[in-house]
Image (cartoon, helix red, strand yellow):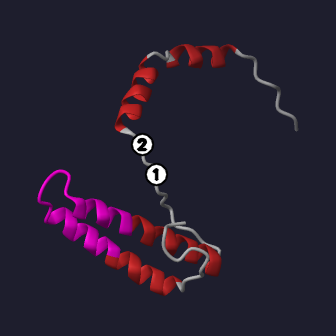
Amino acid sequence: MGRYLQGMTVEPRAALDRLVAALEAHHHAVATRRSDDDPAVDDAYDVLADAYEVYEDSLATVFGEVTPFYLADEVDEDEDDESDEDLDDIDFDDDLDEAEEEPQPAQQR
């Protein structure tokens, strides 16, 4: 869970209102960005991520429901580039050919 409201159950409606406000603030920060590394955008991103987590947790706690979204783990750009290079070395066609050659078990009725 985010840095805020850990261990507390928040009313889903209040959490939704906070999420909508965080979306608005994030949009404003992006639309008025002063540079590529504007700290206001980073701050708005963090607030938005926290607001989403609180909303998701409140939905799960109160209603047993979730949203169709998830927060991706932050990835170091250098790590991401290395993992893309690793994928270039894999011959996916060979794996498909091998899978097609393996005998399939008979279906039971």
Left or right side of 55 for 28: left
Q: Is residue 56 above or below residue 92?
A: below
Q: Position of residue 30 (x, y in %)?
A: 20, 62
Q: Which residue is mark 2?
A: 75
Q: Which residues are magenta?
A: 22-47
Quadrant hosting residue 89:
top left
Q: Position of residue 46 (x, y in %)?
A: 37, 63
Q: Which residue is mark 1?
A: 72
Q: Amino acid at mark 2?
A: Val
Indicate the secondary structure of the residue bearing disc 2: loop
Q: Position of residue 90 (x, y in %)?
A: 49, 17
Q: Quadrant of the N terminus?
A: bottom right
In the rendered image, residue 64 lying in the magenta stretch gets the answer: no
Q: Are marks 2 and 1 in contact (CB under 8 Å)?
A: yes
42, 64: nearer the viewer: 42
Residue at far right of view: 109
Tell me the CA gap for discs 2 and 1: 8 Å
Left or right side of 107 for 6: left
Residue at the image point whose x is 54% and y is 86% from the top = 11
Mark 1: give few (<14), some (14-19) or many (20+) Cα within 10 Å.
few
Residue at the image point whose x is 23% and y is 68% from the top = 27
Closer to viewer: mark 2 or mark 1: 2
109, 50: nearer the viewer: 50
